[in-house]
Every structure is written in structure tokens, then in C-alpha cells.
Image (cartoon, helix red, strand yellow):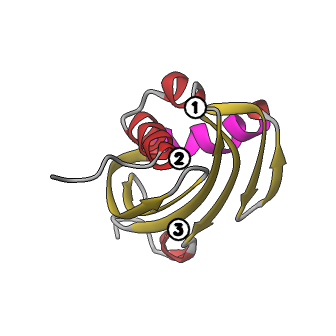
Amino acid sequence: MSEAPSPALETALAYHRAWTGHDFDLAMTYVADDIVCEAPSGRLEGAEAFRGFMEPFSQILTGSHVISAFGDDTTALLMYDTKTLPVKSAPGAECLTVRDGTIRHLHIIFNQAPFIAAQGAPSGS
């Protein structure tokens, strides 16, 4: 018999399924109003700023799969790979702090190299 996922991991996976499934309104139900997000572009504070950062990325997403996921009562760690319109593979990881079923802090590590390379590629590549 397998053990049930931790509370933080359940929230993190539900959030991930929502944004990668192009339901950003549902994804935002897992995000606290006062979320703090440490993103590759810098620190974001509040749900509105977070949505402004993350939703445009979700709109160019064509696929995603979770490579690994771990969690306990308050912290979850997801590693995943995404497919987007500009690049076929864009791996990332998120460390999420969850309280009362909402994400309070999110630290995103994202490989920007594939996007940088795609911007420099000649058209038709």
C-alpha cells in the first residue's frame, strides 16, 4: 500500500496540474494573496505580480511532465520539464512553502539557456 502524498506536495501537484493544463484561474486558487516568489527575473510580491509573471509562460506551454516530486507538511519540491512553442525542452524546479492549502513562498529555478539559444537562432530553425 502506498503512502498518501504530504499536504504540501498535494497542493504543489494540484497547482502544477492546473497551470500546465492551461487553467490559470484554477492554479491561482492555490496561491496566497501575499505570495512571495523568487524567480529568475527577481523577487515578486503578491498574487497579481506572480500572475503577471507566470501566466504568460503558461500560455506558450505545449506540454509538461514531472520528473520528480517530494514533500512534507509545509514544503514541496518539484522538478519538471516543459515543452513550449519556442523550445522543445525547458527544465525547471520549484520549492514551494505551503500553509493552509495555499502557496505562500515559491522559489523557481528555470533553465533559460534554451530560450536564449532560440532567440539567437536563424528563422526556420
Q: Which residue is mark 2?
A: 8
**SS under mark 2:** helix
Residue 54, compared with residue 31, is above or below; it is below
**SS under mark 3:** helix
Residue 101, compared with residue 104, is above or below; it is above
Q: Which percent across, then down, holds residue 91? A: 44, 68
C-alpha gap between disc 3 and disc 1? 28 Å
Q: Quadrant of residue 109?
A: bottom right
Which residue is depicted at the point 34% across and 65% down? 124
Magenta stretch, overall SS: helix
Whether the magenta-drawn stretch holds residue 116 is answered as: no
Asked if marks 2 and 3 touch (Cβ < 8 Å), the reply is: no
Q: Which residue is mark 3?
A: 115
Of mark 2 and mark 3, the one earlier in the sequence is: 2
Q: Quadrant of residue 21?
A: top left
Q: Please name the amino acid that badge 2 sits on.
A: Ala
What residue occupies the far left of the structure in this picture? 1
Q: Is residue 42 left or right of residue 118?
A: right
Q: Which percent across, then down, holds residue 15? A: 48, 38
Mark nearer the viewer, 3 or 1? 1
Label disc, if present, on residue 30 of the rendered structure: 1
Which residue is depicted at the point 35% across and 70% down? 125
Q: How many marks?
A: 3
Q: Which residues are magenta?
A: 49-59
Q: Please name the amino acid that badge 3 sits on.
A: Phe
